[in-house]
Image (cartoon, rainbow, N blue to C red):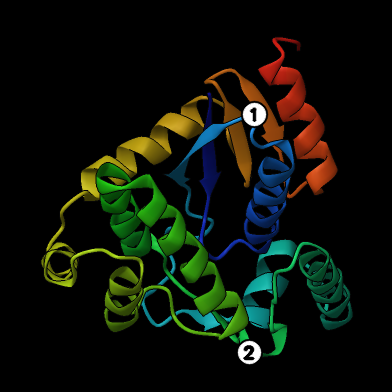
């Protein structure tokens, strides 16, 4: 049984691509190779205000690229997503938002049920990238928690306070101390790193090799 830590942010398009590709690879490898999937927090924009920022403005400022480059990058992402069955709906993603509360909810879900954590993570990706919704909105988070099979009263209490805030920040700091500066970062058995939103074939080959005991 492989242990996979998937370090990512819910506002990271390559993380959505990477997760879809990883799931495809794991489906191809089953039942010979089995894995447990643990989602770990990483914030691309930890200082982002709650109201967010226009996505084109944000990308232009952060990466020093113009509208033409932004459009080309978006189309590349859309095509890569489509190749692994993920619908970006990029026209709807008008803003970038703070994702800290989503990470607190994911941390809680991971302590209760890894399958529910996976469902929540995937629904967060879809809510933001496909539907253009705010992953920091508490009403949305509660709906997604319920749909993932989690207790909405407990989720509401969590979001109303600061539960798991320290744990999320500690986890983020841990991964950064261990060299993770971009996401997605897929760490297998605490020692093997697969970086970026790789195609399914790359994940499949790497996981097969690791499961067989090779480097």
Q: Picture coordinates of residue 206 (x, y %)?
A: 77, 28
Q: Residues within 10 Å of mark 1 (few under 14, many from 20)?
A: some
- Which of 104 and 206 lies nearest the eye of the viewer? 206
Q: Secondary structure at mark 2?
A: helix
Q: Picture coordinates of residue 187 (x, y %)?
A: 58, 30
Residue 189 placement, left or right of 119: right
Q: Secondary structure at mark 1?
A: loop
Q: Are marks 1 and 2 in contact (CB under 8 Å)?
A: no
- Which of 48 and 213 lies nearest the eye of the viewer? 213
Residue 158 placement, left or right of 42: left
Q: Residues within 10 Å of mark 2 (few under 14, many from 20)?
A: few
Q: Is residue 44 placed above or below 68 in the rendered structure?
A: above
Q: Which mark, residue 92?
A: 2
Residue 201 placement, left or right of 167: right
Q: Which mark, residue 138?
A: none
The residue at the far front in this view is 31
Residue 84 placement, left or right of 97: right
Label 1 or label 2, whichever lies nearer to me, is 1
Q: Is residue 167 placed above or below 155 in the rendered structure?
A: above
Q: Picture coordinates of residue 79 (x, y %)?
A: 85, 71
According to the picture, the residue beneath numbered tag 1 turns out to be 33
Tell me which residue sits at (56%, 86%) in the image: 131
Tell me which residue sits at (29%, 55%) in the image: 104
Tell me which residue sits at (42%, 74%) in the image: 135
Tell me which residue sits at (27%, 75%) in the image: 142
In which quadrant of the rendered image does the C terminus lie? top right
Q: Earlier in the sequence, mark 1 or mark 2?
A: 1
Total marks in image:
2
| Quarter assignment of residue 94 | bottom right
Q: CA distance from mark 1 to mark 2?
A: 37 Å
């Amino acid at each position: 049984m492989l242990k996979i830590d998937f370090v990512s942010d819910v506002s990271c398009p390559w993380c959505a691509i990477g997760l879809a590709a990883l799931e495809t690879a794991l489906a191809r490898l089953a039942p010979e190779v089995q894995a447990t999937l643990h989602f770990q927090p990483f914030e691309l924009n930890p200082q982002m205000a709650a109201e967010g920022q226009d996505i084109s403005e944000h990308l232009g400022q952060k990466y020093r690229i113009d509208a033409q480059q932004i459009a080309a990058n978006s189309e590349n992402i859309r095509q890569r997503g489509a190749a692994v069955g993920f619908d970006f709906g990029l026209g709807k993603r008008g803003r970038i938002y703070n994702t800290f509360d989503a990470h607190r909810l994911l941390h809680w879900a991971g302590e209760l049920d890894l399958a529910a954590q996976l469902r929540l993570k995937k629904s967060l990706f879809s809510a933001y990238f496909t539907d253009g919704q705010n992953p920091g909105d508490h009403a949305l988070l509660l709906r997604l928690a319920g749909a993932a099979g989690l207790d909405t009263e407990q989720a509401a209490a969590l979001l109303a306070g600061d539960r798991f805030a320290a744990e999320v920040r500690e986890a983020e700091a841990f991964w950064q101390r261990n060299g993770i500066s971009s996401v997605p970062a897929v760490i297998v058995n605490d020692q093997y790193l697969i970086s970026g939103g790789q195609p399914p074939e790359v994940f499949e080959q790497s996981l097969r090799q690791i499961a067989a005991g090779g480097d």
